[in-house]
Amino acid sequence: MAVTVIVLARSRNLFAVVVLGSLYSFLMATVLVALDAVDVAMTEASVGAGISTVLLLGALYLCKSEEAKPLHRPWLPLVVASACGLVLVYGTIGLPAFSDPAAPIHAHVVPRYLNDALRETGVPNVVTAVLASYRGYDTLGETTVVFTAGAGVIALLRRRRDRKEQKK
Amino acid sequence: MKHDLVLRVVAKVFLPFILLFALYVQFHGDFGPGGGFQAGVIIAAAIIFYALIYGLENARRVVPEWLVERMMAAGVLVYAGVGVAGLLLGGNYLDYFVLDLDPVHGQHRGIFWVEVGVAITVSGVMLKIFYMFADRGTPEQ
């Protein structure tokens, strides 16, 4: 994945960038499968590697396939991004260790879902039970966000009919 | 890619299985990985695949633009409607226990319809975005 990112950052050919982005998504999906998050991996593979690649290629069709040379060296953004990354890494030091059974999340929320979800909802897949039932409001919000995104794209890209008629 | 025979034949063979897999992901989401979001994306991907191989006009004939736009809103309405149904049956908003006499069955029913709503909205939005982008490439008639 690190190799993919470095090549991505150095490449000037946008077609290669899109394909490498898709490759990165697939690697990410593999990592998620290794972490036993199959639902998320499936989403990553279909959305990240599939549809967004097609959309980016569609956008590429509308513009030049070579990135323009930057006019100046972007040192300031690099410093800001590195500082941000360092702060985030510093933040992870405070988190409990990976797969630590004594972590707070394993003491309260997880046992409740894992023990009671099947009895209360009758759905063996706990991810679905949490997503659609326990966190139903959140998922409703997410669906609304997706809808709003689509409405935004329509508002930006729709061709007006009346303009066409004016030309005539 | 419209005149590439191999691609056309392969696409024709693959499409039913992609759609079937989407339905499997949708309805088997209770037991295995998957659910409304993934199923919606897979349906949209199948139709985008069709559009890439057979051309945008043919895809528009299969899934017309007005249907896609209605789907976007209909999914959210189905989801919200499940909540309102819970209210009408005397529970809280998005409370599935009241949807059937047996609370566990009610949960099943609620989750099923919620996932249907998510799938409809997601596939509608994905398709609409694709149509919009693909449309920009063609000159205005």
Image (spheres, rainbow, N blue to C red):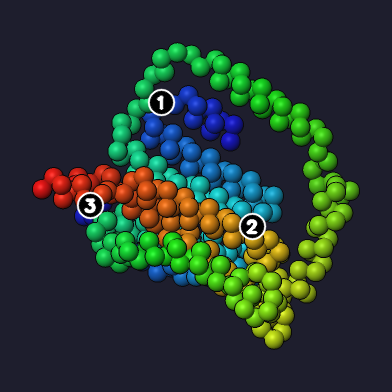
Q: Amino acid at mark 1?
A: Arg
What residue is disc 2 on?
Answer: A138
What residue is disc 1 on?
Answer: A12
Q: Amino acid at mark 3?
A: Arg
What residue is disc 3 on?
Answer: A161
Q: Residues within 10 Å of mark 3 (few under 14, many from 20)?
A: few
Q: Position of residue A99 (x, y in %)?
A: 81, 47
Q: Is residue A96 left or right of residue B82?
A: right
1 or 3: tag closer to the N-terminus: 1
Q: Quadrant of residue B98?
A: bottom right
Q: Which structural element holds mark 3?
A: helix
Q: Are marks 1 and 2 in contact (CB under 8 Å)?
A: no
Q: Nearer the viewer, mark 3 or mark 2?
A: 3
Check the residue under mark 3 and report the chain it is in.
A
Q: Quadrant of residue B26?
A: bottom right
Q: Nearer the viewer, residue B86 or A44?
A: B86
